[in-house]
Amino acid sequence: MTALLEKNIKFQWTSACQKAFEELKKRLTTAPVLTFPDMHKPFSVYCDASRLGLGCVLMQEGKVIAYASRQLRDHEKNYPTHDLELAAVVHALKVWRHYLFGQKCDIYTDHKSLKYIFTQTELNMRQRRWLELIKDYDLEIHYHPGKANVVADALSRKSQISLLWARELPDELAIEFDRLSLGFLNKTEGTVFMEFEPTLEQEIRKGQLNDEKIKEVKELIKLDKAPGFRVDADGTVWHGDRICVPNIKSIRDLILKEAHKTTYSIHPGSEKMYQDLKRKFWWYGMKREVAEYVALCDVCQRVKAEHQKPAGLLQPLKIPEWKWEEIGMDFIIGLPRTQSGFDSIWVVVDRLTKVAHFIPVKTTYSGAKLAELYMSRIVCLHGVPKKIVSDRGTQFTSHFWKRLHESMGTKLNFSSAYHPQTDGQTERTNQILEDMLRACAIQYGTSWDKSLPYAEFSYNNSYQASIKMSPFQALYGRRCRTPLHWDQPGEKQLFGPGIIEDAERQVRMIRENLRIAQTRQKSYADNRRRDLEFAVGDYVYLKVSPIRGLRRFKVKGKLAPRYIGPFKIIDRKGEVAYQLELPDKLSGVHNVFHISQLKKCLRVPEEQLQEDELNVQDDLTYTDPNFGNGRENYRNRVIKMCKVKWSHHTAEEATWEREDDLRADYPELFASQS
């Protein structure tokens, strides 16, 4: 109708004008009636702020006296949330100064920190200025939860209004609501309709009317046979102070979702979630449904740590028949580089006698160089072994290494992915060797490669509890002569049939001692583990380990999910290993895993995690970012910089990082340069 009053516009009364006129009359005649203030009674002010404007309501004894609101000015849009909420309070005090000055009033806000504004020690200049104004009033600030602050927060709380509200919104507000995708905008020509759903309590009241069990409870209440239940004036059934929720899936799912998946709850455990819900809601089997809902939550299964015994009972390796028939090997890397250029140790252990050889190597050694060392340090002394147990390091899984041992008739047995406990003997030897080298570094101060021969001698001549003798004695049948233990003068028989019989008897004794030790170790280990089995066709989550400091979607790797998947089990390998059906994105990962790295998926989610978000390596760590090089010149020095293109980010989001920091965090990326 306003358009008809403009110049050069023909006055033509259309059906649209008539409809607008009728709507205007209706609005003017049915507007809420405001009450008059009583200056002898205290006032209540409800305030709220958003990124669009400020809103407040003046009330007295639960009745509205006045409303006030305004849009934010340009400079106010940059205010932090704390200052915006305080600005709403100041706006109310200025607008209703003639009511509130000299009167007792209570201020209610959904920003809890404002309760302590009078006791804060650190305030900015804006807050100090506003605090001087606030102190002129006899007021007290109270915290009022946002979901209860209905009137002041009406525009952002669709669940608090139970009517169809239509008005012509400003374009910027309509665009903002549309961007938020709140789901209650219905656009027509010239008008934006905002459809608000009924409150949850209204849905529950409505659902109770058709619920058979609640109807039975109502009948029992009339007969005074339902202790603890009551019916209010509106006919709603309550269990004490808890409203009875009807058996309607949509209502219960909404309650469970709000208590578990919103930003106000953030995936609590079943017991915490139940205790939160039981204060307000009640239905039959509520605790069981809450436990099932939490157990089936995909996010909880992927991010929460397990607080129970590791899965999978100990499965010891078979005891070898003879000396140096089966060996284990591993590398100790990351050691300080010596003057000879060594930075790693190749550890080779006989699984029967426990004799170990410690070979200093470089990480840059090729497969041919390692094969040369293997022939000169192992094969020439002990012969060709029948079986080698190792992890899945690139040195042991290379094509050259496999062909070499295939030609010599040696079988290669690899541990399951990301489970070094398979070759526990070698891992334990690594730990002992590292402790020895630390002690040498402290006591003798020499380079570790100079102390390595003495560490090997000391280890092989030390008593081993599992075989009840030293590895040297187990291998040669006699104790090694040392400056502390010497032989008496005389002749000893070193040849003859008795020597062979003694060697065979000693091997039988060693194998029996190993069997007893394995039984004892399995008993101890199984007390701290739990037996668990999966079936072929089950879906499981796979545990991953983030590299320290890795940035994913601008989030540190420490905050990345603990598990990825779920993946389908396609085969069982042995007693405690399973083969998974991995996607093509994870083709570089060996698909057989120990059961301790798996967690059963109770329900396959409709939307699975995109595997390409996690660039997983063979050891189940995330891949590294791409680098570029550069430098920054300072007054007294030059600092080398690297341009880092982070995984799953665009080139425009690449950042410059100091090279020395990157070398400390990702040394393997610079190995080829050294």
Image (cartoon, rainbow, N blue to C red):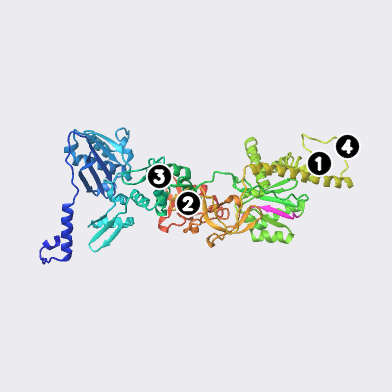
What residue did someone put label 3 on? 220
Q: Real-space Cα distance between discs 2 and 4?
A: 77 Å
Residue mark closest to the camera, 4 vs 1: 1
Q: Nearer the viewer, residue 643 or 435?
A: 435
Horizontally, residue 267 falls left or right of residue 235, namely right
The amino acid sitting under disc 2 is Cys
What residue did someone put label 1 on? 478
The amino acid sitting under disc 3 is Leu
The residue at 13%/65% (across/down) is 13
The amino acid sitting under disc 4 is Gly
What residue did someone put label 2 on? 297
Give the image location of residue 232, x and y in percent.
Answer: 33, 43
Horizontally, residue 458 falls left or right of residue 572, namely right
Q: Real-space Cα distance between discs 1 and 3?
A: 90 Å
Residue mark closest to the camera, 1 vs 2: 2
Horizontally, residue 148 falls left or right of residue 521, namely left
Chain part drawn in magenta: 384-393
What residue did someone put label 4 on? 490
Marked residue nearer the N-terminal end (1 or 2): 2
